[in-house]
Amino acid sequence: MSTPETDLDRLTHVQARIRRAARDAGRDPTDVELVCVSKTIPASRVEPLLAAGCRQFGENRVQEAAEKWPKLRAAFPDLTLRLIGPLQTNKVRDAVRLFDVIETVDRPKLAAELATQMAREGMKTRLLVQVNIGEEPQKAGVSPAEADGFIRHCREDLRLQIEGLMCIPPVDQLASPYFAQLASIAARNGLHRLSMGMTSDFEQAIKLGATEVRVGSAIFGAR
């Protein structure tokens, strides 16, 4: 089998893998959304994917997204832009104005600032809590042991509508147990959105309930 050569070829290949993984897991493939991770990718390469029907995109940095996406959104107003990288509190106002979904809510100070800025801007940004599922010191996210309390704080004290959970498992370990753990945390908190799985492991994530998979290099190639 030949290797896909272009971004669109690779996109088609990834979409087929998602459909196959969902069917193998007894799931409806339409229940799994592909988030194209477009960090560092210029607008000129993103636009063909939009033209091909992709509407979910993930960016890591507020500043880069602010430079890239306004013109693209004007041309494709139904796109969904997701922040999947760490968010500093001094960037919250800009993030709320720019992103439809923020997947990296991970500490009380950030959650409080999000509540303040969303109210001030009249925005209803969709929010996911990032869980540091492998408890790795170099990664952001609330610890699994603290996740229930943090979700409760966001909901009850700050009146935030938490939609789901996001995680990045340790790269040197089997991802499936971590995906299962995230799904368990979500289930006991009544959350139905699971952003988990990337280029190397999204099929495992789909098997364990992912509703969004974040795929970059399998579409755009190595950064």
Image (cartoon, grey):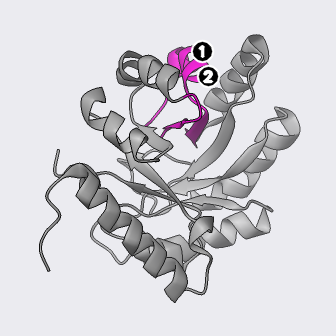
Quarter holding the C terminus is top left
Vertical position of residue 15 compared to residue 156: above or below: below
Q: Nearer the viewer, residue 70 or 151?
A: 70
Which residue is at a point 56% across and 67% down the rendered structure image?
Answer: 210
Estimate the spatial distance between the alpha carbons at disc 1 and disc 2, rounded to whole Å. Answer: 5 Å
Query: Mark 2: which amino acid?
Result: Val
Q: Nearer the viewer, residue 29 or 101?
A: 29
- Which x, y percent locates residue 161? 79, 41
- Which x, y percent locates residue 158? 82, 32
Which residue is at a point 74% across and 45% down the rendered structure image?
Answer: 162
Dot 1 falls on a residue whose secondary structure is: helix
- Which x, y percent locates residue 44? 26, 29
Task: Answer left or right for 153 relative to 41.
Answer: right
Q: Nearer the viewer, residue 213 or 48?
A: 48
The answer to which image quadrant residue 154 occupies is top right
Vertical position of residue 123 compared to residue 23: above or below: above
Vertical position of residue 13 compared to residue 65: above or below: below
Task: Return the mark for residue 183.
Answer: none
Range covered by the magenta-colored residues:
77-104
Which residue is at a point 42% across and 75% down the rendered structure image?
Answer: 203
Which residue is at a point 78% across and 61% down the rendered structure image?
Answer: 189
Dot 2 falls on a residue whose secondary structure is: helix
* Residue wearing tag 2: 96
Reply yes or no: does residue 79 show up in magenta: yes
Query: Mark 1: which amino acid?
Result: Arg
Task: Answer left or right for 168 relative to 106.
Answer: left
Quarter holding the N terminus is bottom left
- Which x, y percent locates residue 115? 74, 25
* Residue wearing tag 1: 93
Q: Are marks 1 and 2 in contact (CB under 8 Å)?
A: yes
Reply yes or no: does residue 215 show up in magenta: no
Q: How many marks?
A: 2
